[in-house]
Image (tube, rainbow, N blue to C red):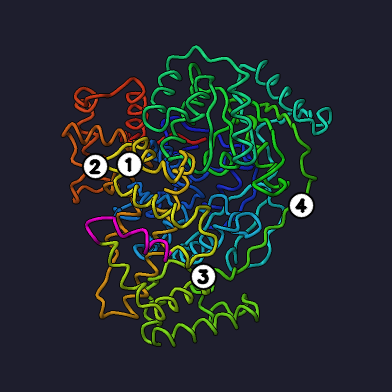
Amino acid sequence: MDIGQDAPVTLHSEQSLVLKHLLDGTNLAVSAPTSFGKSLIIDAYIAIRKPTNVLILVPTIALTDETRRRLSKKFSAEYKIVTTSEVELGGKNILIFPQERAIHYCDKLEQLDLLVVDEFYKASRAFDKERSPALLKAMLKLGEKATQKYYLAPNISDLNDNPFTKDMLFLQMDFNTVFLEKHELYKDIHKDAQKKNNALLQILGKQETKSLIYAGTYPGIDSVATLLIDSTEKEHSELLSDFSTWLASNYHPNWKLTALVKRGIGIHTGQLHRSLSQIQVRLFEEVKGGLQTLVSTSSIIEGVNTSAENVIVWSNKKGQLKLDDFTYRNIIGRGGRMFRHFVGNIYILEEPPSPAEIQLELTFPDELLADVDDEKYKQELTKEQLAKLLQYKEEMAQILGQEAFGRLRSDGALISSDTELIAALALAIKSDPKLGRGLASLNAATNEYWTWILCKVLKLVPGGWDATYTKFAEFVRALSSNWGHSIPELLDQLSEQDVTIEEFFKMERNATFKLTALLNDINVIQKEIIPEHKIDISPFIARLSKAFLPSCVMELEEYGLPRMLAKKIHASGLVNFEDEKLDLHSAIELIRKIKPEIQAKVEGLDAFDRYVLDYFFEGIAIQQTRASAVTG
């Protein structure tokens, strides 16, 4: 079978069945195990059908880069691969986005031949309360433009009737390409912490193969990290020693990860810088001299498509809650891999959840109401939701005026779909003139007066995003010198706020995503309510969304080029990243052309910088147009 590479591949019978349905034009929702090989089907469809526009929705930015690398190797000679919302379309396009980015890009698309939603179970509030509204919004908007839809998830036994998967054929595939051998060690451990630690060390001690440890929570990660630092020997690996030195220099010398990697152990969480997660997965894939073990939260099942011969379930928690059967099966599904490890060893150190049939319920959440056409979806909304929507429209028309509110809705100018939040923002701006005027300080040449207005803005959102208002505001002020200072220097600036390296990652994500979305909606609303102030903070929002780095530096970080390396290349004079005309694709084109000069002339590159550069260049290499592969 032609899947876009030189050598043809033979699909197993269940893969062939799914592909046949797709080639026949069927809209498909497929539940299949982790090791099923669902991505091969997408590649085969593109190679055979040669569609004009394919959009793939993925749950995380880490998975965006992994998918981009896979598809670039096969199709970059024929397709423009688009992963960021600033990039314009080419003649033929493969677009790979997380849901938030896809929503921003939607208006640029007139038509899609195929909409792929990977891990579409995350559209259910039961599985991802925080992100499901955004995914449902993307599925609704993009689904209207798609000729055909292909939704993928593991371990779903049934799908309820709903407007998001209407007219889709649901296929449940139980075909496994690997055998999972389960070792139920929790029966002997009996919740004894010391026995559990000993069991973990014993498993790792006798294994020379790759292991994934599911630690469940951030405190769990910390406990496992401390245990392994205290109880395991350093590896004799020059590559890992170089990596440890690089981490100490570029992030923090006392970070536990710097000690762990010397022992062949990495950490994978959703909060790390994307390039740092990618580098660790790359080291984990190395046959010799790389990482032997990855300690992870559930990010390992959401963020990457890696797997290992051994999966160790160290914890039966997911955050504050007990692990559910769905997530548990997803985790152990990382054991083994088609064509590499046909048997996966699963070591269970805490009692697993009881087996359960999973029916996926997709319903309109209240957080999506501001975006819903109540006439079109009247049947799907509850009486309470219709009443809430009516109240919202009346409130907003009263505050903004009917014409302005109608225009903002039709233009999709507001990012949030939460009626309560938008109404609260509008009311706050209308009743507090100081709030609107204070926004102007964000456009000032100095960040001296940012703290007051940022604290005022943050108080409008329940929860505070896991940091005090002042701490978060001071973090944003420090982040504004991100391009001119290293991360260790920024942490020094934030020493009075006691910001750890882990908090730095988390707050940077919250600043670049959540805060920019909030400020966008405030900016849109205040321009309607108090136009006489003539305040527009969109330049500040644009800078914040890039963590105050030059725009393509942040985007290149997603491609595997860390900011510290971009700074060295910029300092050499070979690439001017501060040039506002330099967009992502022109930057990549330029970097490709001057690859030899970068490797020879950039000062201060250490051995691990060169390893990272090799990985980055591998990911942006253009494949020559290949001859069509024969059939399978």
Q: Is residue 473 left or right of residue 291?
A: left
Q: Earlier in the sequence, mark 2 or mark 3?
A: 3
User: How many residues crowd around disc 2 within 10 Å: few (fewer than 14), some, or many (20 or more)?
Assistant: some
Q: Earlier in the sequence, mark 1 or mark 3?
A: 3
Residue highlighted by disc 4: 357
**Residue 124 horizontal/vertical position (percent):** 62, 59
Kind of residue at disc 1: Leu
Q: Which sits in the foreground, 11 or 620?
A: 620
Quadrant of res 604: top left
Q: Which sits in the foreground, 459 or 579?
A: 459
Residue highlighted by disc 3: 418
Kind of residue at disc 3: Asp
The CA distance from mark 1 to mark 2 is: 9 Å
Q: Are marks 1 and 2 in contact (CB under 8 Å)?
A: yes
Q: Nearer the viewer, mark 2 or mark 4?
A: 2
The CA distance from mark 2 to mark 4 is: 49 Å
Mark 1 residue element: helix
Q: Is residue 385 above or below residue 338?
A: below
Q: Are marks 1 and 3 in contact (CB under 8 Å)?
A: no
- Residue 390 visible in image: yes
Q: Is residue 204 above or below residue 534?
A: above
Q: Which sits in the foreground, 191 or 282?
A: 191
Q: Earlier in the sequence, mark 4 or mark 1?
A: 4
The CA distance from mark 2 to mark 3 is: 37 Å
Residue highlighted by disc 1: 556
